[in-house]
Image (cartoon, rainbow, N blue to C red):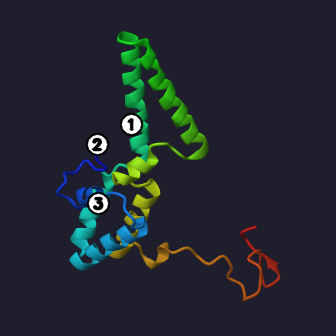
Amino acid sequence: MTPTHEGAGTQAGAWKSRGFDERSADERIADELERCARLGTPAASERLHELDHEWDTDRVIETEVAMVGLVGLALGAFWRRELLVLPALVAANMLVHARTGHYPLSPVLRRLGFRTAREIERERHALKALRGDYSPDDTPAPASRGAPGQSPATDGGKPSELH
């Protein structure tokens, strides 16, 4: 299983082949943005398409749990009953993941090059900004439109329409 449906020749395939190393996800995203800035809008559009098909760690975990659970059930039912411990173990690990956000195989998945959904989304938004998809109207308005020192709840002594 790879992080993308794409082949190893794509940039996403290259991302996977690098795996998790001492470089932070931010540094790797910065390198990708630099490459897309150098190559132009078509490269950014291609990378966005690749990101649409990239598997995040949660998707891989869900797939792994389902596969091991079903295989464990089948092996336990038709071969050796002791193998019914497999679905119990993956269910327990999934419960830990649901409660704490930690999954025992997460470090292995990171080393294989899988990223969190948040990391993928950060790269997606940065590429869209680089490509010019966002207009100036897309920026959030400041919290306060009053004079400096006034609270956001008031506008010159009058209650704000926000409250």
User: Which residue is at 45% across, 18% downward?
Assistant: 84
Q: Residue furthest top?
A: 78
The picture places residue 105, in percent across and down from the top left corner, at 44, 43
Is residue 128 among the parts visible in the rendering?
Answer: no
User: Which residue is at 27% across, 57% downward?
Assistant: 50
Q: Tell me which label, 3 or 2, sits earlier in the chain.
A: 2
Is residue 67 among the parts visible in the rendering?
Answer: yes
Q: Are marks 2 and 1 in contact (CB under 8 Å)?
A: yes
The correct choice, above or below, for 36 with respect to 93 in the image is: below
The picture places residue 131, in percent across and down from the top left corner, at 32, 73
Disc 1 residue type (three-letter): Thr
Horizontal side, residue 60 vs residue 100: left or right: left
Q: From the image, which quarter does the C terminus lie in?
A: bottom right
Question: Which quadrant of the figure has residue 38?
Answer: bottom left
Question: Which quadrant of the figure has residue 41?
Answer: bottom left
The correct choice, above or below, for 31 with respect to 95 in the image is: below
The picture places residue 39, in percent across and down from the top left corner, at 21, 76
Sort mark 2 into few (<14), some (14-19) or many (20+) by Cα contacts within 10 Å.
Answer: few
Sort mark 3 into few (<14), some (14-19) or many (20+) by Cα contacts within 10 Å.
Answer: few
The correct choice, above or below, for 12 with respect to 133 in the image is: above
Horizontal side, residue 121 vs residue 47: left or right: right
Q: Secondary structure at mark 1?
A: helix
Disc 2 residue type (three-letter): Met
Residue nearest the observer in this picture, 24 or 34: 24
Give residue 18's mark: 3
Disc 3 residue type (three-letter): Arg
What separation in Å lies between label 1 and label 3 (alpha carbons)?
A: 22 Å
Q: Nearer the viewer, mark 1 or mark 3?
A: 3
Residue ID for mark 2? 1
Q: Residue furthest right?
A: 157
